[in-house]
Image (cartoon, rainbow, N blue to C red):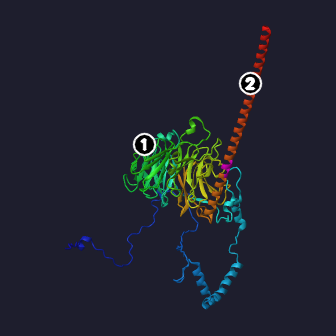
Amino acid sequence: MEIAYVYTKTRAEFGKQCFFADGPTEILESILPTDEYDDSYVQRNPRSVGVCTAPPMSESEVNTERITTARSSMHHVEGGWPKDVDPTEQSDVARYRKKAEKDEEYQYAVRMLGPIVMKCMRENNTINLYEEYFAEDGGAASSSSSDGADGNGEAAMDNSSSSGTSQHRTEAPSAKGVAVFRDPSDVRRTATSIDWHPEGSRIAVSYSIHSFQDKRLVDPNMSSSAFIWDITNSNSPLVELLSPSPLTCLRFNPKSSDTLVGGCYNGLIVYFDLRKPNAPPGKCRPLSVSVIEKSHHDPVGDVFWVQSKTGHQCASVSTDGQLLWWDTRNLEAPIDSIPLPKTGESGDSGDNKNLALGGSSLEYNTEAGPTKYLVGTEQGIPLSINLRQRKSNNGITVLESQGSNNNGQHHGAVRSIQRNPMHTKFFLTVGDWTAKIWSEDIKTPIVTTRYHDAYATSGCWSPTRPGVFYITRMDGAVDIWDLYHSHGEMTYSHKVSDVALSAVSVQGNTQSGGKLVAVGDVNGTVSLLEVCNSLSKLQPNEKASLGNAFDREARREKNLEIRDREEKRSKAVEESRLKKEKEILELADEDEEDLLLKAEVEFFSMIKEVEAEKKVG
């Protein structure tokens, strides 16, 4: 039943009603001028009056209507054959074509289309469709691609990797700043790692201080939080990740992007789930934390999600010499572990011959194999680990050339190690003042860049171009190398900050992305750069050319290793032969001395016998 009540108000409650009417003009008051109050005022002399003679201006904006564009494509396949003709059988196709070519309608259609085709062919012959305009201006940009490789092992690939392909760029390499994300903490911390969300719209940044006994570590205002940023909003972080210790590395789960795993400065492994609120809005606490007694004993160098049936397993490495596997559903203890020993004969003796290496970086890529790992060490030696060969030295291969020259070994810690996104057999390492490209089955690098003036701090490949990689330096610059265009020198260098850079990461995967590059520095500032299309889009025939170049350099290094091994073997054989000859000569000298001594003894004994006989006679 509908209940309604009407409220009413009488006209008397509104106040007195006003009536308006037209009437003649009336003067109610008139005040005439008077000098009665002149004594109360003083005349101002001179008097300043401002006058503006500028004409009035106005501003207006006009925005034209946006034109919406769309891409469309068509894929043509062979078809239109009769049902009784199998296009995969050459005999049936030839029989049908012979029959169709005898048809009068077919002959008539060919005669009618002939003049049209001939006209198009003449137009193509008249106009050079592939003519390059402004060749003089564009030739300078591509002339650097003709620089050959030198003989010092620096950028060892020659230009035959791109033979038969055009080396002209559609645009000069460039990069521009898009956004800047500053650490909200009061104490300046280093941006130790940057990881992109699988969808490419967010970045997870971990902050820590790696300097030993730094005064900032005991500052009560120092924060241990990491942040997730939306790349479209640089004013405030999207989520604050609360951690018991400053995070040194942080990774999104590629299968479940709402979960993250991180490694801490005190060796702990923490697991975050953004779907389960356990903190105030805008913050997230770890869903589980590893036990410190069973965790790493040094800061975690890197952590990666690994392939598993449940999608909850990850691997971590640290400078304590351990590679640990974890299940994020239960972080009480690692599910597996491998120590990182130095098993190769490197000329060391004593206690250093079996020294445990400290892991500083980690790489895992399912495209290369679910059981393969790469570890960069503090000693500058990369390690290749294959769990299928675990019975032999725990599956560890030390990529170190034998001998005391340490050919290919970095002179400092390997800051970054990453597989090529399209040729996973080859990987990049960054350390000391250079970057090197290796092959899994060779213990020496196949490509080495020239030494930079400043120390290299990190590096990574472009996910969309197999020949482009990025290197950050301590002088605040990021170098971009394009091996498909030039092998002897860097393609482009961009000054990002006045302080040392610490981390770099590129958005996207092998199918899309590659334009946005996030670079972190020691002050906790992450700069977002956008590179040009020539550095982000796959070039024609680039994948095959780079693959052939890498394979050729790998074969060359193998041949050099075989030659070096044969020279060492022949040298060892020669030394052994000389040693045996020396021993024979020494034995011959000793035999001659023994014979002389024996003859001398016999001679004196005969003299004594003769003298004795004379005395008796």
Left or right for 284, reference 84? left
Pick out the residue farthest to the front: 617
**Mark 1 and mark 2: span between their CA atoms?**
71 Å
| Amino acid type of the residue tagged 1 in the rendering | Lys
Residue at the image point whose x is 56% and y is 79% from the top: 87
Left or right of residue 566, residue 179 in this image: left
Whole-percent x, y for residue 220 in the image: 44, 41
Q: Which mark is residue 594?
A: 2
Residue 403: x percent and y percent? 64, 42
Label 2 crowd (10 A; few <14 / some 14-19 / many >=20): few
SS for callout 1: helix
Residue 209 makes an appearance in the image: no
Relative to 207, 289 lies left or right: left
**Relative to 395, residue 137 above or below:** below
Q: Quadrant of the N terminus?
A: bottom left
Identity, as a three-letter code, of the amino acid under mark 2: Asp
In the drawing, what numbered circle is on residue 294? 1
Q: Position of residue 345 (x, y in %)?
A: 60, 41
What segment is highlighted magenta in the picture? 559-563
| Label 1 environment density (alpha carbons within 10 Å; few <14, some 14–19, many ≥20) | few
The C terminus, quarter of image:
top right
Asked if residue 544 is among those painted magenta in the image, a careful observer would answer no
Q: Looking at the image, is 209 positioned above or below residue 34?
A: above
Residue 467 rendering spot, x and y as whole percentages: 61, 59
